[in-house]
Image (cartoon, coloured by chain):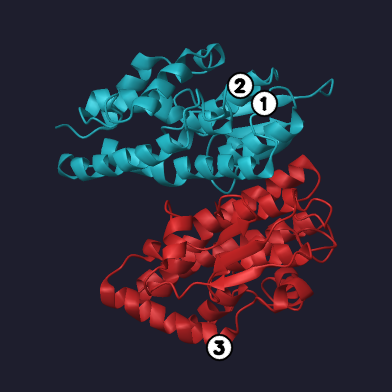
């Protein structure tokens, strides 16, 4: 059941690929990280074969099972498969629904706004995109207050599903702050998230998989330039 | 099941998303109160809906003993975990992951493609239609010879695919674009017939002529 080799196909920069790695770390499950070349280079045969539908990282390989795709789905699979380890989703169905709701919001609504901000040209476009990103962060600050119930993480005493879902964006969030001279998560505006971010990034399950901020910023510049140069839309990322 | 469970669904008669929630509750024999929301005119949305779903301001919302849950797929997972009769997800974690994958595929890829094929201006429709046919071909592979995506009985993927099972044919009729043909997608076509013939599904479909009117009003004329 929980036996068999575990591998994660991802990239060093991908926030989505970070997620299963954090989860496996929480469960103390050994895995091999197969690094896919970066997203703007040619996709490997392995990626195309294991995720023919979306052609994206991450992909989880476990024993003889066929590959599993989509990071949030992988998180749930990890939680259910290594069920004796520390839980990733909360135990109460309503809390689980809340965690799933916010993770879906982040991926479906908030992150596209972040991408738009990344490639926005001109003050008006940037202002509009920034407002959307800030609105999302404000919602997450409120959500943190509700979910953490006074504890250190969205998951309570320990890192959980929503900590992983949102936390995986922190590296890119810092890049966005740097490029726009803005503060999205800080002590004044989002005190709860500010403390949470520090706590999360130094957590044993997270710190080794969180990409280096400067490296990410450098990479971001290349990505943005390429996207603008190729006239690609943000959603192709 | 708790005695004194209060379950309410805020939905709209024409919304496949709110019908998903109703279908799951019907399947599991959970009694609920239904509250109709007018989603066609924003100003008509009830204060309660806006209070329970401030982030998206949309139907469906499930209210269970006063606690609101939004987003149909999130609601389906909640329903599955709360009421154990007639499970809509498999037990095995891998099979569960696959079901979740296909449900998400329906919302992330199939639905936007179908919307584009239905409501784009006429000159963009053929390309959009091709995209739909590709999506549906991929979706069909998930059936793998089974009667339903869920196996012998309908499950989460079947519920999520309700707009393919019912709304799609109406859209085809109005636009004249062939999206799900019995020749090219025989298995999926057969699934749509199985789906709409399910007694519990029949209880949960909007009247065809009303949906036809709505679609006709939205589709750009040829």
Q: CA distance from mark 2 to mark 1?
A: 6 Å
Identify the subunit bearing mark 1.
B
Q: Secondary structure at mark 1?
A: strand
Q: CA distance from mark 3 to mark 1?
A: 50 Å
The residue sitting at 57% across, 43% down in the picture is B98
Chain (cyan): B
Q: Is any part of residue B71 visible from this angle?
A: no
Q: Upstream in the sequence, badge 2 or badge 1? A: 1
**Horizontal and vertical percent for residue B133?**
30, 38
Labels 3 and 2 positioned on one and the same chain: no
Q: Secondary structure at mark 3?
A: helix
- Report which colour depicts chain A: red
Asked if residue A51 lies left or right of residue A170, the reply is: left
* Residue at which label 3 appears: A214
* Residue at which label 2 appears: B34
Q: Which quadrant does the C terminus of chain A fall into?
A: bottom left
Labels 3 and 1 positioned on one and the same chain: no
User: Which numbered tag is attached to residue A81?
Assistant: none
Identify the subunit bearing mark 2.
B
Identify the subunit bearing mark 3.
A
User: Which numbered tag is attached to residue B8?
Assistant: 1
Q: From what the image shows, is residue B48 above or below residue B197?
A: below
Residue B23 in which image quadrant: top right
Labels 2 and 1 positioned on one and the same chain: yes
Q: Secondary structure at mark 2?
A: strand
Q: From what the image shows, is residue A149 above or below residue B163?
A: below
């Amino acid at each position: 059941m929980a036996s068999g080799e575990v591998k994660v196909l991802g990239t060093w920069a991908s926030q989505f690929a970070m997620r299963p790695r954090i989860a496996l770390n929480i469960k103390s499950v050994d895995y091999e990280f197969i690094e896919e070349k970066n997203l703007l280079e040619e996709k490997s045969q392995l990626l195309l074969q294991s995720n023919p539908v979306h052609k994206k990282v991450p992909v989880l390989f476990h024993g003889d099972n066929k590959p599993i795709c989509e990071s949030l789905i992988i998180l749930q699979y990890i939680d259910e498969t290594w069920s004796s380890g520390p839980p990733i989703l909360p135990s109460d169905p309503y809390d689980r629904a809340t965690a799933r709701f916010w993770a879906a919001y982040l991926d479906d609504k908030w992150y596209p706004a972040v991408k738009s901000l990344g490639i926005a040209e001109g003050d008006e476009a940037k202002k509009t995109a920034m407002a959307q990103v800030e609105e999302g962060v404000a919602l997450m600050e409120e959500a943190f207050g509700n979910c953490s119930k006074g504890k250190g993480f969205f998951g309570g005493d320990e890192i959980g599903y929503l900590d992983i879902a949102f936390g995986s964006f922190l590296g890119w969030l810092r890049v966005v702050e740097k490029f726009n001279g803005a503060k999205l998560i800080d002590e004044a505006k989002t005190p709860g998230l500010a403390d949470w971010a520090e706590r999360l990034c130094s957590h044993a399950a997270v710190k080794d998989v969180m990409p280096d901020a400067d490296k990410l910023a450098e990479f971001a510049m290349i990505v943005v330039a390429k996207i603008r140069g190729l006239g690609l839309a943000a959603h192709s990322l | 099941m708790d005695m004194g469970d209060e379950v309410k669904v805020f939905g709209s008669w024409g919304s496949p998303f709110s019908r998903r929630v109703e279908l799951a509750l019907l399947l599991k024999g959970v009694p609920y109160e239904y509250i109709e929301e007018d989603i066609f005119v924003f100003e008509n949305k009830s204060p309660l809906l806006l209070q329970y779903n401030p982030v998206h301001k949309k139907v469906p919302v499930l209210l269970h003993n006063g606690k609101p849950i939004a987003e149909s797929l999130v609601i389906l997972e909640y329903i599955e975990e709360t009421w154990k009769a007639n499970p809509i997800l498999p037990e095995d974690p891998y099979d569960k992951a696959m079901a979740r994958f296909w449900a998400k595929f329906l919302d992330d890829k199939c639905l936007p493609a179908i919307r584009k094929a239905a409501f784009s201006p006429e000159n963009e429709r053929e390309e959009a239609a091709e995209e739909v046919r590709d999506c549906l071909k991929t979706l069909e592979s998930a059936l793998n010879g089974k009667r339903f995506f869920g196996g012998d009985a309908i499950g989460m993927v079947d519920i999520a695919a309700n707009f393919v099972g019912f709304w799609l044919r109406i859209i085809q009729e109005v636009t004249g674009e062939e999206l799900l043909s019995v020749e090219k997608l025989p298995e999926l076509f057969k699934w749509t017939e199985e789906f709409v013939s399910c007694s519990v599904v029949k209880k949960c479909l909007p009247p065809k002529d009303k949906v036809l009117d709505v679609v006709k009003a939205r589709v750009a004329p040829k």
